[in-house]
Image: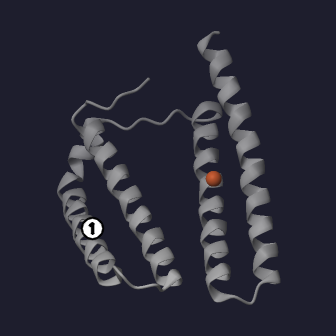
Amino acid sequence: MSTKEKQDQLVEILRSWQHVENKSVAQAADIIDRSPNPVIRMIMEIIQRDSAFHFRVEQFIIDSIEKQAVTLTPDDLAQVWGAIEAHIEAERRTGELVAGAEKALAGTRNVVQHFLISYLAHDEKKHDQLLEDLGSIKRGMYKSA
Ligand SMILES: [Fe+2]
């Protein structure tokens, strides 16, 4: 397959993906309407926001193919790396807080607290991973397939 064909295929996949995001937003809204439970409502709101943002990211990739190519170079990152490092430090602190919260919850049976701390822990890890990947790009060592 040519590069052009592969890029066309990627756009097609991303458009299907956006349909799923839209559906997910609507389904979450429906669940929010049906449930008075604040935990369920909050989780559905999180999913709604994430899906809406995923839609934007998918559109960004589509635009980078159809409208204007986008680059991210080690220089782009070097320019703001001091500030990014401060942010990495803040994320490290949340890691400690997550560990503290998990320790404080150990042996307790509050399902809601366990569930929500687990959500936060995963989300903070996700941020770590994003920043780690930016670090690899900065070092020119990012693995591209
Ligand atoms: Fe998504």
Q: Tell me the amino acid under the disc marked 1.
A: Gly
**Foreground residue among 113 and 131:** 113
Q: Is residue 32 left or right of residue 102?
A: right
**Foreground residue among 87 and 34:** 34
**Foreground residue among 32 and 19:** 32
Q: Is residue 45 left or right of residue 123?
A: right
Image height of 76 relative to 118, above or below: above
How many labels, in total? 1
Q: Position of residue 63 (x, y in %)?
A: 62, 39
Q: Is residue 58 left or right of residue 112?
A: right
Q: How is the image coloured?
A: one colour
Q: Position of residue 77 (x, y in %)?
A: 27, 45
Residue at 58%, 49% in the rendered image: 57
Q: Position of residue 129 (x, y in %)?
A: 35, 50
Q: In what quadrant of the picture does the C terminus appear?
A: top left
Farthest front residue? 107
Q: In what quadrant of the picture does the N terminus appear?
A: top right
Residue at the spot of label 1: 95
Residue at 57%, 36% in the rendered image: 64
Instruction: Count residues near mark 1 (Cα–Cα under 10 Å), then give few for <14, some for 14-19, many for 20+.
Output: some
Q: Check mark 1 vs ligand 1: CB closer than 8 Å? yes or no.
A: no
Image height of 10 relative to 99, above or below: above
- Helix, strand or loop status at disc 1: helix
Q: Position of residue 118 (x, y in %)?
A: 44, 70
Residue at 70%, 25% in the rendered image: 9
